[in-house]
Amino acid sequence: MSKYLLTHKESEKKHRLKNKDKKKEYLKKYYMENKERSSEYAKEYYLKNKDKKKEFRLNNKKYTKEYYLKNKEILLKKHKVYALKNKVYKKEYSKEYHSKISKELTDVYLRSQLAKNGLKSNKVTHEMIEVKRQQLIIFRGIRDIRKDIKDGVNTE
């Protein structure tokens, strides 16, 4: 790279840092005037770079956690607005999710079951989860056998 290019980049960087607030205001104003165009562009960008965004989030967990902690109130407001706009979808998704985790006996589900019995989530060990998993498998097996007997199906 030439010396001019380096000095030009440096001066641009200084200029951006110096006028950070002005730039922010300008972008905010532009967004407000062009909401449809901006949201359309954002959707296209998201769809094109879905995998990259997910990969970035997974590779930069520390940054992601810091970001969420730093912007907690803003993100909570956004989540509330989303939840209000998408009540039906959220309800269906929640129903499917809980059905799936209870069928698969995931650690999350078993932890919640143990918590219902009075245990605190942070006190639950992996061994307790495994024992609860075996217990539920046995109970479900007994329930299925009883149902088969009640329906008159031969269990032999």
Image (cartoon, rainbow, N blue to C red):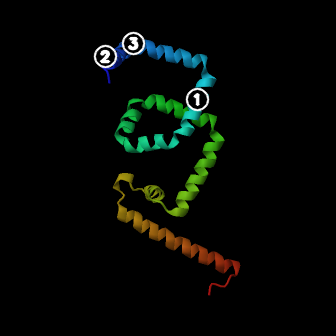
Dot 2 amino acid type: Thr
Counting residues from the start of the chain, the first of labels 1 and 3 encountered is 3
Instruction: Give the secondary structure at mark 2.
Output: helix
Residue 142, placed above or below residue 44: below
Instruction: Give the secondary structure at mark 3.
Output: loop
**Which residue, as the protein is rendered here, is positioned at the far left?**
3
Question: Which mark, by number, is residue 29?
Answer: none
- Between disc 2 and disc 3, the foreground one is 2
**Which residue, as the protein is rendered here, is positioned at the far right?**
152
Task: Find disc 1 in the rendering and name its residue.
Answer: 41
Task: Find disc 3 in the rendering and name its residue.
Answer: 19
Q: Position of residue 141 (x, y in %)?
A: 55, 74
**Residue 12 in view of the camera:** yes
Task: Find disc 2 in the rendering and name its residue.
Answer: 7
Dot 1 amino acid type: Tyr
Q: Position of residue 77 (x, y in %)?
A: 51, 30
Number of residues whose C-alpha sits closer than 10 Å to that of mark 1, classed few (under 14), some (14–19) or many (20 or more) = few
C-beta proximity under 8 Å, tags 1 and 3: no
Q: Quadrant of the N terminus?
A: top left
